[in-house]
Amino acid sequence: MTVGKAAAMLGVTVRTLHHWDAMGLVRPSERSAVGYRIYTAEDLLRLQRVLIYRELDLPLDEIGRLLEAGSEGVESSLRQQRDRIAERMERLEQMSGALEKLIAAHERGVVLTSEEQLAVFGEDWDPDWSRQARQRWGNSAQWAQYAERSAQRDAEQWAGLVNRTEQFESELVEAFQEPIAVGDEAANALAERHRMLMSEHFDCTHSMQACIARNYAAGGELNEYYERLATGLGDWLKEIIDANARAAGIDPETAQWE
């Protein structure tokens, strides 16, 4: 069989066969009457072995050694390659599972079952809230960050975040009722803790935090949540966040989402 016909049959290029010939991997054993180089049946079998080894991602120099090795050497090398492939398959399975979780996180926000969500977030939690959040913010960079971080959390890690949030809110109510003056170091520290809690979901700057805080004041969509903790707490939380933003060089009145 000529080089061109062999290349077509094997699904490789003529240039590839020339390269393998030049490096001594597989050389046509005969010539036609007019001088064309011809692969014999034995040559074609050797080419097929090369293709099999290439499918296993073996380098050409190692393939050359295998072609010349005895059965024992070939078997040992193939076993090693089989083990490497098994390891790669395991890694790919792990990557596939991680990708599935990431896809689910982008779609649903929280990658927990409805039962796990109720156990972690409480009976008042509505699993549909995450879907609503995706509809509203799903195209934002912050939702992408939220999804990536959510995909890494199991129920226990979510519970830890809930506990940290509840502890913060308890201390926030205490500080509000003392009261701690807006702009005091302790009040600024609480505002920073709030920003760090936000940053567990997505990177939250002082400017972004000031934008979020607008929803805490009277008339804001999150005011009712803080009002249930303590009357007037939402307005006060906005005030300490605004004061901390000013300390960081941000005017909360003109703060923009970054």
Image (cartoon, rainbow, N blue to C red):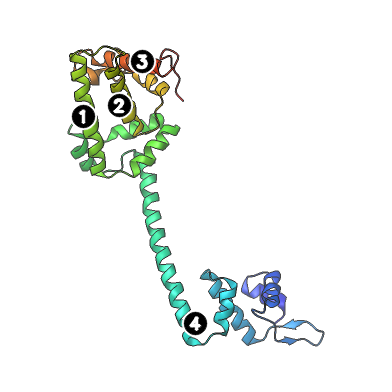
The circle on residue 166 is 1
Task: Please name the residue that numbered disc 2 is placed on.
Answer: 193
Rendering quarter of residue 18: bottom right
Which mark's residue is nearer the viewer, 4 or 3?
3
Residue tagged by mark 3? 242
Binning the other alpha carbons within 10 Å of mark 4 as few (below 14), some (14 to 19) or many (20 upward) gives some
- Hey, what amino acid is under mark 1? Glu
Q: Earlier in the sequence, mark 1 or mark 3?
A: 1
- Classify 97 as above or below 46: above
Mark seen at residue 76: none
Q: Earlier in the sequence, mark 2 or mark 3?
A: 2
Residue 49 position, x and y percent, is: 56, 79
* Three-letter residue code for mark 2: Arg
* Contact (Cβ within 8 Å) of mark 1 with mark 3: no
Of residues 115 and 253, the one drawn nearer to the viewer in this rendering: 253
Q: Viewer-proximal residue, 45 or 61?
A: 61
Q: CA distance from mark 2 to mark 1?
A: 12 Å
Residue 46 screen position, x and y as percent: 60, 82
The kind of residue on which mark 3 rests is: Asp
